[in-house]
Structure formats: C-alpha cells, structure tokens
Image (spheres, helix red, strand yellow):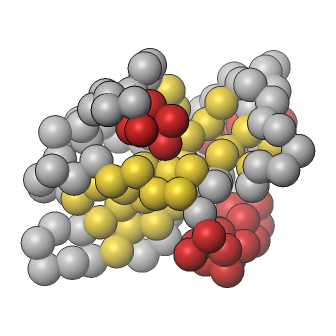
Amino acid sequence: MTTSRPQPSFASLSLASRSRKRREGRKERPVAVGVRTARADGDSVLFFPITTKQPERDRFAFEIPAIEKRRAGLDADRHLWIIMDEFNSDVIGHSFYLEPEPPIGRFSKDFFLPILREFIARRKSLSEVSRHR
C-alpha cells in the first residue's frame, strides 16, 4: 500500500548520525510516509524527511510545490524539499518512535507517484536507516 501523508513529526535519523553511533534523530521534523507494506511481524513503513534546507544538486530530492504544501498541511510560504536518497524505516506495532497521530495532510497522487516510481527504480542505491530494534 502506498501513501503520501505527511505526519506531524518523526525524529528522522540521518546516515551520518547513525555512523556516529547516535540512536535518536537530532530534531523532530515532518516526514512523508512514502511506502507502507504488509509483513507478518507488522507493517513496514518508510519515512522520507521534509526539510527547509536546500539539498545539494547531486541529492535525490524534490522541492514541494506550493499547492502540494497546502494539501499536505505544510507551510506554503517556506521552501521545502522531500529527501528521497536517505530515509528511515520502521515496523508499525514494534516501533519506539511512531506515535498514533493522524496525518497533517496529503500529497496528490499526480505529485507523489512519479517520485515514488523513481524511488523504486533507485532503491538499491539509496541509504536506508532502520529504526527497528
């Protein structure tokens, strides 16, 4: 099942932080839930951080258009990007990080599905930070 609902916040852990032996993200930030798949031990979910910091040109990231920011319940007056090349994963029902909060909004399929297709095509070359313990 695919969704594109920004969650209120998630302490996204970067690959650099993980390599420094950190177990927690530096700050809470909205995240886009990009993929949720059924598993026997609980649904797996991938989180893509949303940031105000413009990513470097070689990053796999997309700027969020104003209309999509409004649909998603994000600040339409700020430049925002979804970072796709470094993402977190977790298992629903076994997570120490997920809170049962409703999504703050939703991206349109026209915006998010092409991004998700590109993610799937590149998945093996991207950096996953598993939050499942």
Is 103 rendered above or below residue 92? above
- The residue lying furthest to the front in this view is 20
Tell me residue 66's x, y (percent): 83, 36
Specify the quadrant of the image occupied by residue 116: bottom right
Tell me residue 33's x, y (percent): 48, 53
Residue at (84% x, 50% y) in the render: 58
Q: Is residue 14 visible?
A: no
Tell me residue 122's x, y (percent): 66, 74
Q: Is residue 77 visible?
A: yes
Residue at (16% x, 39% y) in the render: 96
Tell me residue 41's x, y (percent): 11, 72
- The residue lying furthest to the right in this view is 57
Is 14 rendered above or below residue 27? below
Instruction: From the viewer's perspective, tell me whether residue 43 is left or right of residue 12.
Output: left
Is 5 rendered above or below residue 73? below
Residue at (51% x, 36% y) in the render: 16
Specify the quadrant of the image occupied by residue 98: top left
Specify the quadrant of the image occupied by residue 44: bottom left
Instruction: From the viewer's perspective, tell me whether residue 125 is left or right of residue 77.
Output: left
Q: What number of labels is visible?
A: 0
- Quadrant (top left/top right/bottom left/bottom right) for the N terminus: bottom left
Residue 71 vs residue 4, the one in the foreground? 4
Instruction: From the viewer's perspective, tell me whether residue 110 is left or right of residue 103.
Output: right
Residue at (40% x, 51% y) in the render: 129
